[in-house]
Image: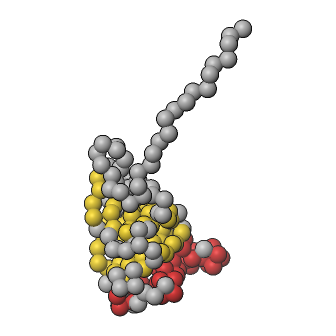
Amino acid sequence: MTAPQPARREAPVTPAAPDAAPSPEQGRPLLAIRARDLVVGVADVKLASERGQRLITYALGSCLGIVIHDPVAGVAGLLHAMLPDSTIDRAKAAVNPAMFVDTGVPLLFRESYKLGAKKERIVVKVAGGAHAGATEDADQFQIGKRNFLMLRKLLWKNNVLLQAHDVGGCQTSRTMVVDVATGAVIIRSQGAETSL
């Protein structure tokens, strides 16, 4: 019979300050989750108006991540929409309008107005819309392309400009982060981070 082993003790880990910029010594990526971050899931929408908050969504393939920001009101919103057109399933659209671009975008704008945003000040940025196949021709349903076309149509019809976009590519996944106070957007894709 062996003697019981003493419990292992490990040194406590001291977390970095939530707003501290990561250093190479810390070994943590720029897009590491912070305590006040809000994660936006697939077919989800979130808005925020507190300084120091960020909105983050992951795994934007053919889906679109649509950011709106009003720099005067300090309001930002992020929609992670899966499909372009709610007419394929009106019942699902009624339950979750964020699933579709054509119902999610109006919801995103309406909710931002409740927090003090004004349409004429809103800045729009988008990422995602990748092809599901290894080539554009191999993507039978063209969901990513159709998502982006639906967004552009909605913005055009409502006289809203698209300031920046990072869309397309084949089998590309993107992470999108927006700083609520500044509206700065960072995209991480294939190990690289870029500002949008």
Q: Residue at x 45, y 74 (%)?
A: 50
From the viewer's perspective, tell me whether residue 4 is left or right of residue 66. Answer: right
Q: Nearer the viewer, residue 65 or 35?
A: 35
Visual colour scheme? secondary structure
User: What residue do we see at 28% from left, 45% from top?
Assistant: 24
Q: Is residue 181 above or below residue 195?
A: below
Q: Position of residue 113 (x, y in %)?
A: 48, 88
Is residue 151 in view?
Answer: no
- For the C terminus, the quadrant is bottom left
- Please tell me which residue lies in front, 29 or 166: 29
- Toward the right, the furthest residue is 1
Quarter residue 182 falls in: bottom left
Question: Residue 105 placed where, x, y %?
Answer: 47, 80
Closer-to-camera residue (108/112) = 112
Which x, y percent locates residue 128?
38, 64
| Pick the front one: 144 or 51 | 51
State the count of labels.
Answer: 0
Visible residue check, residue 186: yes
Quadrant including the N terminus: top right
- Residue at 29%, 78% (x, y): give it: 163
Q: Residue at x 41, y 72 (%)?
A: 51
Which quadrant holds residue 31? Answer: bottom left
Residue 188 percent coordinates (x, y): 34, 56
- Is residue 100 rendered to the left or right of residue 177? right
